[in-house]
Image: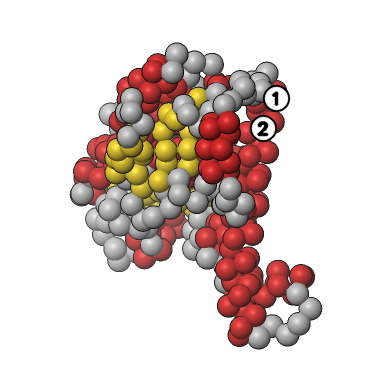
């Protein structure tokens, strides 16, 4: 497997096991050591490459230990401090990293709980670890643009100077992306006022603020959805997978389809599109990909064979707090199966394939 495939493989393992990892030691064994060995390519059992419980006396602090040090040329190059995976990473967790960074030749410090990986260097002051990471890797939601930068820290491609030189741009681009994502999830007053002033000429009163807070959030979600749909359409055209015209339908089928399509203010979410892609990938074991279609409504997100409402494969009920995968039997009676997230769809792969086979 190449680098990105190994990263995806470990990410899948972490998704499956994250719920049962309750201690720091368990996180080290299940997530951190595999990352060091399988992703970065260092031998965790060779003390010339990876030193567990790395010790470097710091002033009056004696005997303090960093969880791992990756060594190259007899010098510590990367320091790694681990925390329990059930908690969020906070800056106060990095106190030992701050001290060790100043007394070693390491240019990279890493704070991780096995799921999130925060990478630090010394952009703000030489030999002093920055307070903010220049790169944040979330193994449950990997940003593919970061993969080449992570690869620079691997044994086969180690290039610390290159990654440090790119660190400033990575730091601010990453921070801006996280801030934009936060604004899309929950727009701040400043964000709402900024966009409202571009489209509304009246005074920005309390009533206007309340009105446009919902409108800005809705517009942001629709913008993201349209961008995703555009990418999917482009991918289908490039791959030669343009959806052919649907077969002729009876009047009853057309009426049923109009019932599904009558809601014009439906907002398709990214999770629904991701769920659709998973169902489509599963169903492709039985039919060509272009035959798997989707339609959204206020009640549910439908996945159909041949874009025919009389051939439902599955329904996604993702509008409430609890997500459900709806599967229909031969009599079109639906059973809703609760799932924690979109990955839960995979547990019903055979039922999805069976639904497709019924129409063939």
List x then y, in percent, for residue 328: 35, 32
The quadrant the N terminus occupies is top left
Q: Is residue 209 visible?
A: yes
Kindly state the secondary structure of the residue where label 1 is placed. Answer: helix
Label 1 sits on residue:
237
Residue 271's place in the image compared with 102, above or below, is: above
In the rendered structure, the answer to whether residue 349 lies left or right of residue 156 reads left
The residue that appears at 39% across and 28% down in the rendered structure is 9
Along the viewing direction, whichever of 166 and 332 lies nearer the viewer = 332
The residue that appears at 21% across and 43% down in the rendered structure is 20
List x then y, in percent, for residue 49: 37, 32
- Are the residues tagged 2 and 1 within 8 Å (C-beta)? yes
Residue 46's place in the image compared with 269, above or below, is: above
Label 2 sits on residue:
233
Q: Which mark is residue 309?
A: none
State how far apart marks 2 and 1 are (Cα). Answer: 6 Å
- Crowding near the residue tagged with mark 2, few <14, some 14–19, many ≥20 C-alpha atoms within 10 Å: some
The residue that appears at 40% across and 46% down in the rendered structure is 317
- Crowding near the residue tagged with mark 1, few <14, some 14–19, many ≥20 C-alpha atoms within 10 Å: few
List x then y, in percent, for residue 175: 57, 58
Along the viewing direction, whichever of 345 and 313 lies nearer the viewer = 313
Q: Is residue 76 visible?
A: no
């Amino acid at each position: 497997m190449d680098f990105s495939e190994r990263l995806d493989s470990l990410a899948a393992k972490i998704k499956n096991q994250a719920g049962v990892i309750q201690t720091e030691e368990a996180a080290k064994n299940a997530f951190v050591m595999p990352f060091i060995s399988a992703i970065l390519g260092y031998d965790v059992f060779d003390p010339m490459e990876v030193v567990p419980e790395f010790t470097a006396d710091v002033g009056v602090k004696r005997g303090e230990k960093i969880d791992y040090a990756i060594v190259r040329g007899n010098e510590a190059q990367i320091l790694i401090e681990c925390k329990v995976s059930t908690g969020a990473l906070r800056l106060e967790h990095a106190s030992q990293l701050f001290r060790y960074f100043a007394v070693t030749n390491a240019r990279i410090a890493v704070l991780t709980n096995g799921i999130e990986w925060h990478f630090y260097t010394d952009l703000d002051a030489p030999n002093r670890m920055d307070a903010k990471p220049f790169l944040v890797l979330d193994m449950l939601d990997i940003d593919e643009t970061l993969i080449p930068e992570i690869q620079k820290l691997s044994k086969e491609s180690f290039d610390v100077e290159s990654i440090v030189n790119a660190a400033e741009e990575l730091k601010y681009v990453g921070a801006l992306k996280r801030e934009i994502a936060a604004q899309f999830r929950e727009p701040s007053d400043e964000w709402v006022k900024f966009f409202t002033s571009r489209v509304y000429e009246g005074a920005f009163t309390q009533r206007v603020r309340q009105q446009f807070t919902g409108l800005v959030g809705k517009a942001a979600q629709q913008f993201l959805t349209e961008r995703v749909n555009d990418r999917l359409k482009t991918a289908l055209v490039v791959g030669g997978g343009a959806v052919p015209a649907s077969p002729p339908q009876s009047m009853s089928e057309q009426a049923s389809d109009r019932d599904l399509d009558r809601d014009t203010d439906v907002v398709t979410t990214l999770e629904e599109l991701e769920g659709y892609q998973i169902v489509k990938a599963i169903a492709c074991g039985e039919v060509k990909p272009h035959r798997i279609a989707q339609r959204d409504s206020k009640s549910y997100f439908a996945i159909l064979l041949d874009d025919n409402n009389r051939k439902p494969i599955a329904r996604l009920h993702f509008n409430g707090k609890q997500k459900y995968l709806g599967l229909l039997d031969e009599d079109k009676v639906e059973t809703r199966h609760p799932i924690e997230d979109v990955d839960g769809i995979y547990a019903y792969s055979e039922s999805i394939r069976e639904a497709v086979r019924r129409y063939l």
